[in-house]
Amino acid sequence: MKLRDTLFLSRANLKGNRHSNLGVVVIALLCISLTVISLLAFTLSKEINEYKDDFRARTIEAYPYNRNFDEKTLDEISEINHVESIDIEDELRVQFFHIENIYDENGTYEEVQNLINEKDTLISAWSLIGKEKRQVIAGKRLDETPEFSCIIPHLFYPFDEDVYETSGLDYIDGESLIGKTITLNEGSEGFNIDFFDGNEAKRVNIPSFQVKLNIVGVYYASVTADGNPSLIYISEDTGKKLLKMAVEHSGRGDDELTDFMNKPEFHNIHITVDDFDNLSEVYNELKQMNIYVVDGTELGINPSTPVISTFFNILSVIITLSTFIISLILILQSSKNMIDNKKEEIGMMKAVGYKNKDIFCLVTLEQIMMTLRGFIIGIGISAIVVTIINLINYNSSYANRIYIINYVDYLVFTFVALAVVVLVPLICEIMFLRKIINIQPREAMN
């Protein structure tokens, strides 16, 4: 049978199939479920997994409050199950800075400088520690560059605003700043260095001093993991140099701060756990050892995010599975009814020379045409929904960017939906192949 004739007969039979409209609706719902609800669940799960894999999400900070971190104590901590590494904090780990200017050999970067002059700036600088690495999407990594370099987020917003609540922010393209120099200071108030000297908590105020960093790369700042629009990273060596600069700038050459610098047992430590799921076990062990630890890791997360992710995962499974089962039942019923109601027609086709494979192609094509209609409608609706979701969240607060759907992921899920709607009717018709073969030409006389 020619393909043109098969298509003609399939269209004609499809018009007479009273279950076709219902089948189209169910297939459309299946496609929407796969490409919207399942994709949202996948997007959130991917963000949660990125968070769990992040170095800072697996790092516990401990203070030498109850006991000093001498070699014996460090050895005891390293013997705890799941402890991957212990790093002594001897760098300027986290510090807030204001921006004076951003410039290169051609002068000040006017477009950003105008914003800096208009708004209060505030960024947080994190120095890497131990085995911590940060991948870049443009430029160079920190381990490839000299000291006093930094990497910034791909969406850069170095202003003193709550990015997690404010909508419609005009982010700066981080890549446009690669190769420029950023000048920082702590403002007129300076900053404080807090530490423990034995069991005594101490604070030393450091006058503001200027820091210049070369912007060498851009990292992808995901909502749950690597950072936020106002967070920049510097290397561990740069962090150590900055701490020494701060101590020297304090003008207190022989006081308790300098003495503290020479006592690593009084420094904070960072304990990295091999897997996020083992954090609670390590926490309990540390507390039993009478070690003062910070509640929560360095990288926090909104408590509602895992709950929402779990909700969408469950909803996705329920809706996708139920619509799949319903569509499978409808296609099976439709195929059975078609064969039962068209025995005479199939018998006549065999009588005039049509082979079993021709008839199988005919009925299979009819079902595929029905499901493809549902697929086109469903994918069209899901494309509109995904576009609306992305438009809303692109212009919403930074926290809501967790719901932005990657269009590459959308295409992958679209192909999955297409494979499902094509394979399901094919499998159904294979199940009824014997029934088609058993129809004899004499059925045309009934």
Image (tube, rainbow, N blue to C red):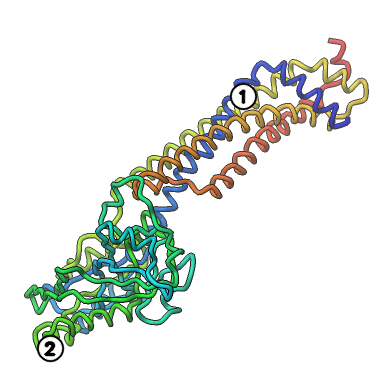
Direction from residue 35 to residue 41 in the image, left or right? left
Residue underneath mark 1: 23
The answer to which image quadrant residue 297 occupies is bottom left
Furthest-right residue in this view: 352
In the rendered image, the quadrant that contains the C terminus is: top right
The answer to which image quadrant residue 109 occupies is bottom left
Q: Residue at x 18, y 85 (%)?
A: 248
Q: Is residue 32 above or below residue 307?
A: above
How many discs appear?
2
The answer to which image quadrant residue 359 occupies is top right
- For the residues labelled 1 and 2, the Cα–Cα distance comes to 82 Å
Q: Can residue 85 be seen in this view?
A: yes
Give the crowd class for mark 1: few <14, some 14-19, many >=20 residues within 10 Å.
many
Q: Which residue is drawn at 54% across and 37% down?
A: 383
Give the crowd class for mark 2: few <14, some 14-19, many >=20 residues within 10 Å.
few
Foreground residue among 101 and 246: 101
Residue 98 in picture, x, y percent from top left = 25, 66
Residue 113 in picture, x, y percent from top left = 34, 63
In front: mark 1 or mark 2?
2
Q: What mark, if any, has residue 144 been given in the picture?
A: none
Furthest-bottom residue in this view: 254
Foreground residue among 1 and 400: 400
Q: What secondary structure is marked by label 1?
A: helix
Q: In this view, does 268 lie above or below 165?
A: below
Residue 28 in picture, x, y percent from top left = 57, 30
Three-letter code for the amino acid on which mark 2 is drawn: Gly
Q: What secondary structure is marked by label 2?
A: loop
Q: What mark, if any, has residue 253 been given in the picture?
A: 2
